[in-house]
Image (cartoon, rainbow, N blue to C red):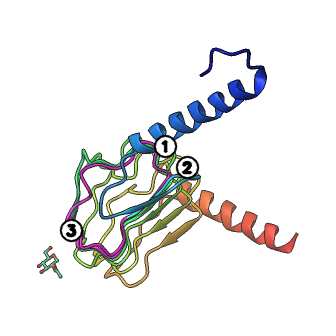
């Protein structure tokens, strides 16, 4: 077999099988956690409602959307398996009480972060959102927050939606710079709606 004079057709089919094999290898290397489901484009890791008590030890390296809501996760450590490639991270309705400083450092692609309904969160580290330059939506509703550290939202240049309802906040200190920026954004939104 294969030594006869065969023109282009078999070569094309070899090429197809080779590509398929490479693609399967690539998929395999993404190593979806056993209890989760993974989908491609964009790479989504769905681990919601699986009873996780911590962030799964291994997540595919190019994950874009990581869904971890409705588990029993108690902390987001500084070094977790979360990759900085992630753009949507859903952690709502867990029992997170600790988010270590630096837990989200380097997450420059992060656009939406949902930490809502973690009723024992209570406090935030001042620089925990530092460097999230593409974050546009941040959910912190129903987190038992009593106060916010000064400048906790500083540097979130793209932030357009901030959800803080149902906390125990007694005052909100927003720097004039942040205020100016948010006003600009809300005006832009209004303009877009009118257009
Ligand atoms: C959530 O965490 C708090 C401590 O931070 C603990 O007291 C509580 O029992 C936990 N709740 C559940 C449902 O695990």
Q: Is 43 above or below relative to 71?
A: above
Q: Is mark 3 within 8 Å of ligand 1?
A: yes
Q: Which residue is mark 2?
A: 134
Q: Is 132 above or below relative to 118?
A: above
Q: Which residue is mark 3?
A: 97
Q: Residue at x 38, y 44 (%)?
A: 83
Residue 194 in which image quadrant: bottom right
Q: Secondary structure at mark 2?
A: loop
Q: Quadrant of the N terminus?
A: top right
Q: Picture coordinates of residue 97 (x, y %)? A: 21, 68
Q: Picture coordinates of residue 112 (x, y %)? A: 51, 60
Q: Which residue is mark 1?
A: 108
Q: Picture coordinates of residue 189 (x, y %)? A: 73, 68
- Write down the region rendered in magenta: 47-74
**Disc 1 + disc 2, Cβ < 8 Å:** yes
Mark 1 / mark 2, whichever is N-terminal: 1
Mark 2 / mark 3, whichever is N-terminal: 3
Residue 123 in which image quadrant: bottom left
- Residue 11 falls left or right of residue 57: right
Q: Answer few, some or many: residues within 10 Å of disc 1's Cα (few below 14, many 20 plus, some between 14 and 19).
A: some
């Amino acid at each position: 077999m294969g030594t006869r004079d065969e023109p282009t057709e078999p070569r094309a089919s070899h090429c197809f099988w080779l590509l398929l094999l490479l693609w399967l290898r690539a998929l395999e290397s993404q190593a979806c956690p056993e209890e989760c489901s993974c989908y491609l484009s964009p790479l989504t890791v769905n681990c919601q409602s699986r009873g996780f008590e911590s962030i799964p030890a291994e997540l595919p390296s190019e994950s874009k959307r990581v869904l971890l809501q409705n588990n029993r996760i108690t902390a987001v450590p500084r070094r977790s398996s979360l990759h900085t490639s992630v753009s949507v991270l859903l952690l709502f309705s867990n029992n997170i009480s600790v988010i270590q400083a630096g837990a989200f450092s380097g997450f420059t692609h992060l656009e939406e972060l949902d930490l809502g309904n973690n009723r024992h969160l209570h406090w935030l580290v001042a620089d925990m959102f530092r460097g999230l330059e593409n974050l546009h939506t941040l959910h912190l509703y129903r987190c038992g927050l009593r106060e916010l550290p000064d400048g906790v939202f500083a540097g979130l240049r793209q932030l357009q939606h901030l959800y803080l309802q149902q906390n125990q906040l007694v005052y909100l200190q927003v720097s004039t710079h942040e205020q100016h920026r948010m006003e600009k954004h809300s005006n832009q939104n209004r303009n877009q709606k009118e257009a």
